[in-house]
């Protein structure tokens, strides 16, 4: 007997492979694009942008910026150029922007010695990294440095308190969602628009766990937007609803998303 399968997706909306937890799934490109259009605003939108040029300028003086840029072999910017960077919140050279942000990070952390102690590397290694002579640390030190900068962004974005406590996220959205349930002849398939509220208004388990909230923030910060959709689908399937599991043939699968709201408490 022929199995029931979902309709063929329109061209240009081929699913994207991603993972959440230990589950690898394919999510809708249209859902990913919908999240980018609606979700990357407010606190969440600032997670993957790092420090603003204004923040860099407030930590590093004009002479500091000129010295740092000159050390890379580039022409030091004039005061007028630095003012324009701040006004536009943009440093045209991505490499220079990264180097300046590293210097800001080290300065705000307490200096080279403080960063070296936190990531378990020598002061010499940190100096190489901050001056751009080393792209990144290795092994555990790389993970530690990445986590520190991520959590710094979380605090700046307002999704984590200044003392490092992750806030609770309340999420609501309207989605056209495919419902997939395995059966003797395949899985049943239906699609309709419905509202999802992960905010505790119906029951406490509708709120994302701390683990899923952290994974969501990390995914946004790293630009892994397909993974964000997978996290929402997984939670909708196994915590918000009562599916036995979530994978390519089980649970809710979002085709499009709108009216998205995420607030942190």
Image (cartoon, rainbow, N blue to C red):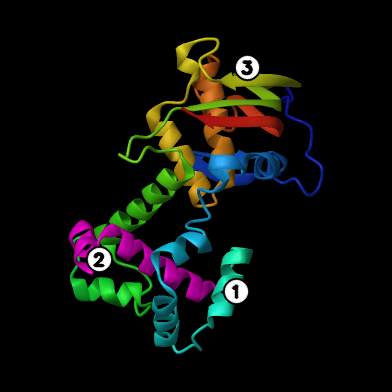
Q: Which of marks 1 and 3 is nearer the N terminus?
A: 1
User: Is 109 in the magenta?
Assistant: yes
Cα distance between the residues tagged 1 and 3: 58 Å
Task: Tell me if I can see residue 169 in this picture.
Answer: yes
For the N terminus, the quadrant is top right
Q: Is residue 230 above or below residue 52?
A: above
Kind of element beneath mark 1 = loop
Residues packed near mark 1 inside 10 Å, few (<14), some (14 to 19) or many (20 plus):
few
User: Which residues lie in the magenta part?
Assistant: 92-119
Percent across and percent down for residue 174 are 70, 25
Q: Which of marks 1 and 2 is nearer the N terminus?
A: 1
Q: Earlier in the sequence, mark 2 or mark 3?
A: 2
Q: Depth-wise, is mark 2 or mark 3 nearer the camera?
A: 2
Kind of element beneath mark 3 = loop
Q: Nearer the viewer, residue 11 or 152?
A: 152
Q: Nearer the viewer, residue 147 or 97?
A: 97
Q: Mark 3 points at which residue?
A: 184
């Amino acid at each position: 007997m022929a199995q029931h399968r979902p309709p063929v997706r329109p061209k240009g909306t081929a699913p994207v492979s991603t993972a959440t937890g230990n589950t690898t799934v394919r999510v809708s490109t249209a859902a990913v694009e919908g999240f980018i259009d609606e979700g990357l605003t407010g606190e969440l939108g600032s997670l993957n942008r790092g420090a603003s040029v204004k923040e860099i300028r407030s930590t590093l003086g004009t002479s500091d910026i000129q010295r740092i840029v000159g050390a890379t072999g580039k022409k030091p910017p004039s005061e007028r150029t630095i003012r324009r960077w701040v006004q536009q919140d943009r440093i045209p050279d991505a490499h220079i922007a990264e180097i300046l942000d590293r210097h800001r990070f080290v300065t705000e952390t307490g200096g080279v010695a403080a960063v070296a102690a936190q990531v378990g590397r020598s002061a010499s290694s940190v100096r190489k990294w901050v001056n751009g002579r080393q792209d990144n640390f290795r092994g555990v030190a790389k993970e530690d440095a990445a986590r520190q900068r991520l959590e710094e962004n979380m605090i700046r974005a307002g999704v984590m308190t200044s003392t490092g406590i992750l806030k609770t996220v309340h999420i609501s959205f309207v989605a056209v969602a495919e419902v997939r349930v395995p059966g003797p002849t395949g899985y049943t398939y239906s699609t309709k628009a419905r509202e999802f509220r992960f905010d505790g208004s119906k029951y406490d388990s509708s709120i994302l766990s701390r683990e899923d909230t952290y994974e969501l923030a990390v995914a946004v910060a790293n630009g892994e937007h397909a993974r964000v959709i997978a996290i929402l689908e997984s939670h909708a399937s196994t915590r918000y609803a009562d599916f036995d599991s979530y994978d390519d043939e089980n649970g809710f699968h979002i085709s499009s998303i709108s009216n998205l709201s995420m607030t942190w408490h």
